Amino acid sequence: MRRRLYLMRHAAVAYFGADGLPHDPRDVPLTPEGVEQARRAGEALASVDFDRVITSGLRRTVETAQIVAPNREPESWATFEELRAGRLEDTAEDGLEGAFAGAFAGALTPDTRFLGGETIGELTGRVVPALEEIVADTTWDTTLAVLHGGVNRAILSYALTGQPVFFGGFEQAPACINVLDVDDAGRWIVRIVNSAEHLAVTEHLRSTTMEEYYAEYAALRAGRENDR
């Protein structure tokens, strides 16, 4: 039996003030738009009974989780905090646009730094073991994880390949929902990526198409045997 992980990115926040100066990314709250995004995601997932709700502990993930799953106390896992950027003032003014636009673009290697800060290898080095620790706990069936764009990319990349690689091309919209299933051997199936419409994300089966074909065949065969 596979277990299900609903993997969200936190809802919208404002990283910069009206003066253009950056806020402390560790403490930015959801914007009014972000609160509405989280509310709509909560409506989409209202029928799901979560055994666990996991956040990075940063305010934006906790606030999102509390809106989406108000009846479950969120856990804080600092290992799932977002990629840590360097100081923007250390980047030349004429290079900022390219630094932001290209943060997740092109061929990213373990040595690639995120805006002059943490490397991709450092991110996967903390995210993958934490994910494996959660999977190793077989007491849960359905979990909500409200995390971050870079962290979610690392999780999706690992789920697809079984390796600590990083595909920057996975877009993660604010309050988007990804749906992944995993078995007790740690084998993943990626069901939905970056769903921002919040439509029909809870209705997907946990079996593969070929498993469904076989189940249909087996049922038909059993019916024929019973008719003899």
Image (spheres, rainbow, N blue to C red):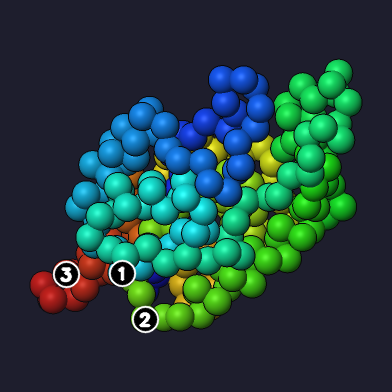
Q: Earlier in the sequence, mark 1 or mark 3?
A: 1
Q: Mark 3 to mark 2: distance in Å?
A: 35 Å
Please tell me which residue is depicted at 83% across the width and 42% down the height of the picture.
116
The quarter of the image holding the C terminus is: bottom left
Task: Please tell me whether mark 3 or mark 2 is closer to you in this view.
Answer: 2
> Is residue 83 rendered to the left or right of residue 118?
left
The quarter of the image holding the N terminus is: bottom left
What amino acid is found at the position of numbered circle 3 in the picture? Gly
Q: Mark 1 to mark 3: distance in Å?
A: 37 Å
Please tell me which residue is depicted at 21% across the width and 49% down the height of the picture.
46
> Is residue 122 rendered to the left or right of residue 145?
right
Q: Quadrant of residue 218?
A: bottom left
Q: Mark 1 to mark 2: distance in Å?
A: 9 Å
Closer to the camera in the image, 25 or 7: 25
- Spot the residue most to the front: 19
Task: Please tell me whether mark 1 or mark 3 is closer to you in this view.
Answer: 1
Identify residue for label 3.
223
**Are discs 1 and 3 less than 8 Å apart at CB?**
no
Whole-percent x, y for residue 45 in the image: 27, 48
Identify residue for label 1.
51
Please tell me which residue is depicted at 67% across the width and 37% down the height of the picture.
169
Whole-percent x, y for residue 66 in the image: 32, 52
Say which mark, if any, is on residue 139.
Answer: 2
Could you tell me if residue 115 is visible in this image? yes
